[in-house]
Structures are given as C-alpha cells and as structure tokens.
C-alpha cells in the first residue's frame, strides 16, 4: 500500500488529529463514519475490551417495547433512518449486514393479548403492531394465549459491521489498537497518552467508551452503569422457525439449526465471567416455551452502557472545551447509534442543538461529584 502522510505519522510516537474517537463499538464506529462523511480529520483508538457490549449484541431492533406494549423511544424517526443508514453502509462496503425480520410476540396472558389487539387498531401503534393473532406451531411451542407480529423490525450482523468498518479505518490509517490511558490539556489541544507509549494531540475528543466511561475522570459524574447481559447459542434441530420469537426473551434463528437466545439483565452483577444464574434463567424460559429438545452450545457475556432514564447521553463537557461524550445506548445500540452519531456531529460542526431528552445537560446537577 502507498504510504500516506498519515500512515507515516503512525510510526512515530506523537500524532496530531482534529478529532480523537475513543472506542470502536457501535457508538464509536458510527461517530467515526459520520466524521468521515463530513470530510473531517479523525483518529479512532480502541482496545477491544472483552466485555464490550457490541461484540455480544444480538443485533436486533424493534419499534415496540414488548413489556409495556408502547412504541420504542423515537421509533417513528429512528426506524426509517436506521434502515436507510445500514442499506447505504452495505452499498459502500459491499457486504450484507442488515436484514428485515419478522418478530412474533408470544402472549403470556389474555390481558396482554387484549391490550395488543386494542393498541394495534390505533395510530401510531398500528404502523408496527399487526392486528391479527397468529398461532405458533403447537408441535414446537407452548403458546396458549397465541401471538401476534411486529412489522418494521430487523437485525444487524454487529460483528461483521464492526470488523468491516475497522478494516476500512485500518485502510485509511485512522485507527490504533491501544488503550487511552490519560488525557491532559496542552496549549489549545488535548494531549492523549496511550498505554503503549504513543501520544496524540487532538483538538477534540469524543469518548465512546461504553460502560468503561465509569473510569473516565472527566465524565464519571454521569450516571452510566454497566448492565450485565448474557446470551446463549443453542442447537435445536427439530425447530423450524425463520421468525424472531419473543416471549419475554428472544430466540433468533442463526441458520443450520442454531439459534441465539437472550438476553439476561443483571443490574448488580459486575463480574467479568459468564453468569451461571443467567444461563439457568434462560434455559428455564426456553424449557417453558419449547416442546422440542435443545442443546446449549455456548454463552457470551457483555456490559450494556445504561443510564438511569434509559436514554442516550451526548454532548460537550460542561467545563472543558473540546471534550465530548456519546454513550448510554443501553440495549438499543443498533437503533440508536446511527441516528444519534449523526446528530452529535451535526451539533459539533453545524451548531444544531442537541435534543433535550438525550443531552448531557440533563445531568448538570450531577456535575461536581468528581475532581474535574
Ligand atoms: C447480551 C447483550 C445482548 C444485546 N443485544 C442487543 C440487540 O439485540 N440489539 C441492540 O441494539 N443492542 C443490543 N445490546 C446492546 C448493545 O450491545 C449496546 O447498546 C451497544 O453495543 C453499546 O455500544 P457502545 O459502543 O456504546 O459500547 P461498547 O460496545 O462497550 O464499546 C466501547 C468500546 O470502547 C473501547 N474503549 C473503552 N475505553 C477505552 C479506552 N480508554 N481506550 C481505548 N478503547 C476504549 C472498548 O474496548 C470497546 O470496544 C446487547 C447487549 C448485550 C450485553
């Protein structure tokens, strides 16, 4: 490959960039792609943490919050944006990562069924909730209260989306595999010291660190915590099912008799190990729903970056110019990251105000709990 000025600079211990993006999960990837689209100079640094949420995400998105049977946050604008975004990414990268998927919601009671039937007859719910009932295959499922279906849901192959984006950043000499250890002001810039010794001088930093932002001295005043989640991969040769089935947990077909099953939520478990309790819980739910045998093949665990009000958090640090955060994607990174990454870069470069519900300013009263 022809050596560019940037790739030569990578060999030296000190690099200059306009924007440093910290993290290359769903948040950092979408921010870096938005910067690229706006022709901005940027560099990503990512240490591929083993508890990164994005690596284990099933990649599903869905306009309905099943347990409340309400529309998901901003569904009406996020769903069309998300579909168009991944379609455009596929065209640019020549790889298929996105698929529209039918979600079948299995009801747990007659009340839930009635609530669905009533809501699905009214706008806006009727845009996404099918109005009729479906009867899941009685040879396969215990579903005495039947089911209905969701439209406009889908799924992203997150590992492929991230690794192909990473290949693209590598080809552009725009990513370093390293951990950002320390940040300090230097003249008009931020001096960023990496674990392996390099330093980066950046005009601005956008922190997309997922749950690890709890260790960030500038942003640890924000109420972002890690919500542990586990998923199982099962083999179930007798099940013939192309839909994503949701019965308070999901079963997602992977092909060749394999299915992803999840996900658990553990708010107070911060262990790095897979959770035995989560495995028991998911296996128990599967046994309750399925009439056919299955075998657990493996289990993965990760930490969702979650805020108290379950909304993303983004914007500029209240005191230090040039420091930004994009975080709090919770369990909806696939739906939230594309739209809000573009929203944040529009804010930074085009002065578009950040939507109040996702703005960092809603946590201003928390500021002051750290030395920064
Ligand atoms: C079990 C499970 C299932 C899920 N299923 C779904 C799903 O079906 N659909 C959906 O939309 N969402 C799902 N999610 C949620 C989704 O994974 C998150 O919303 C999203 O991935 C969060 O992305 P992020 O980039 O903010 O954080 P992360 O994915 O955690 O990425 C943060 C990145 O920053 C890097 N980093 C952090 N600090 C530093 C530093 N100092 N220096 C260098 N690098 C650093 C880390 O190594 C990591 O790569 C699931 C989550 C779990 C746990």
Image (cartoon, helix red, strand yellow):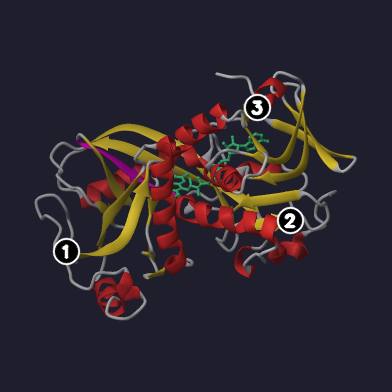
Q: Inspect the magenta stretch and tell me whether residue 263 lies in it.
A: yes
- Chief secondary structure of the magenta portion: strand
Q: Relative to 46, say whether 269 is above or below.
A: below
Q: Which mark is residue 38?
A: none
Residue furthest to the left in view is 139
On the image, numbered disc 1 is attached to which residue? 144
Q: Badge 3: few (under 14), some or many (20 or more) residues near its Cα, within 10 Å? A: some
Which residues fall within the magenta stretch? Answer: 257-264
Q: For mark 2, give the secondary structure.
A: strand
Please identify, in this view, whether the residue under mark 1 or under mark 2 is nearer the observer. Answer: 2
User: Whole-Å distance between the Cαs marked 1 and 2?
Assistant: 51 Å
Q: Position of residue 69 (x, y in %)?
A: 36, 70
Q: Residue at x 76, y 63 (%)?
A: 364
Please identify, in this view, whether the residue under mark 3 or under mark 1 is nearer the observer. Answer: 3
On the image, numbered disc 3 is attached to which residue? 178
Q: How many marks on residues? A: 3
User: Does residue 358 appear in the picture of this structure?
Assistant: yes
Marks 3 and 1: CB-CB under 8 Å?
no
Dot placed on the residue nearer the N-terminal end, 1 or 2: 1
Instruction: Please tell me in which quadrant of the rendered image residue 18 appears.
Output: top right
The answer to whether residue 338 is left or right of residue 191 is left
Dot placed on the residue nearer the N-terminal end, 2 or 3: 3
Q: Badge 1: few (under 14), some or many (20 or more) residues near its Cα, within 10 Å? A: some
Q: Which mark is residue 316?
A: 2
Q: Inspect the magenta stretch and tell me whether residue 151 lies in it.
A: no
The answer to whether residue 68 is left or right of residue 370 is left
């Amino acid at each position: 490959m022809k050596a560019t000025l940037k790739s030569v600079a990578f060999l030296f211990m000190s690099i200059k960039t306009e924007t440093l993006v910290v993290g290359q999960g769903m948040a950092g990837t979408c921010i870096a792609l938005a910067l690229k689209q706006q022709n901005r100079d940027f560099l990503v640094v990512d240490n591929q943490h083993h508890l990164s949420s994005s690596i284990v995400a099933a990649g599903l998105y869905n306009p309905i919050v099943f347990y409340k049977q309400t529309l998901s946050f901003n569904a009406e604008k996020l769903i069309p944006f998300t579909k168009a975004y991944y379609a455009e990414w596929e065209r640019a990268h020549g790889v298929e990562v996105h698929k529209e998927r039918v979600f079948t919601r299995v009801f747990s009671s007659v009340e839930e069924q009635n609530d669905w039937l009533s809501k699905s007859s009214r706008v806006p719910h009727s845009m996404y909730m099918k109005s009729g009932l479906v009867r899941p295959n009685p040879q396969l499922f215990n579903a005495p209260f039947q089911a209905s279906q969701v439209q406009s849901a889908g799924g992203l192959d997150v590992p492929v989306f991230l690794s192909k984006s990473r290949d693209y950043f590598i080809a552009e000499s725009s990513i370093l595999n390293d951990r950002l250890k320390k940040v300090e002001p230097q003249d008009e810039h931020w001096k960023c010291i990496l674990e392996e010794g390099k330093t980066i001088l950046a005009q601005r930093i956008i922190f997309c660190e997922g749950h690890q932002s709890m260790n960030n001295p500038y942003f640890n005043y924000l109420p972002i915590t890690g919500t542990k989640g586990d998923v199982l991969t099962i083999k179930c040769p007798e099940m013939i099912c192309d839909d994503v089935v949701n019965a308070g947990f999901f079963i997602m077909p992977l092909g060749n008799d394999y299915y992803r099953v999840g996900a658990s939520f553990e708010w107070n478990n911060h262990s790095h190990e897979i959770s035995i309790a989560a495995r028991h819980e998911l296996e128990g739910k599967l046994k309750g729903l399925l009439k056919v045998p299955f075998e657990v093949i493996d289990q993965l665990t990760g930490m969702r970056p979650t805020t108290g009000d379950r909304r993303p958090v983004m914007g500029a640090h209240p005191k230090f110019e040039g420091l930004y955060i994009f975080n709090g994607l919770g369990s909806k990174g696939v739906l939230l990251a594309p739209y809000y990454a573009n929203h944040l870069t529009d804010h930074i470069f085009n002065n578009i105000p950040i939507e109040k519900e996702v703005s960092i300013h809603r946590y201003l009263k928390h500021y002051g709990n750290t030395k920064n």
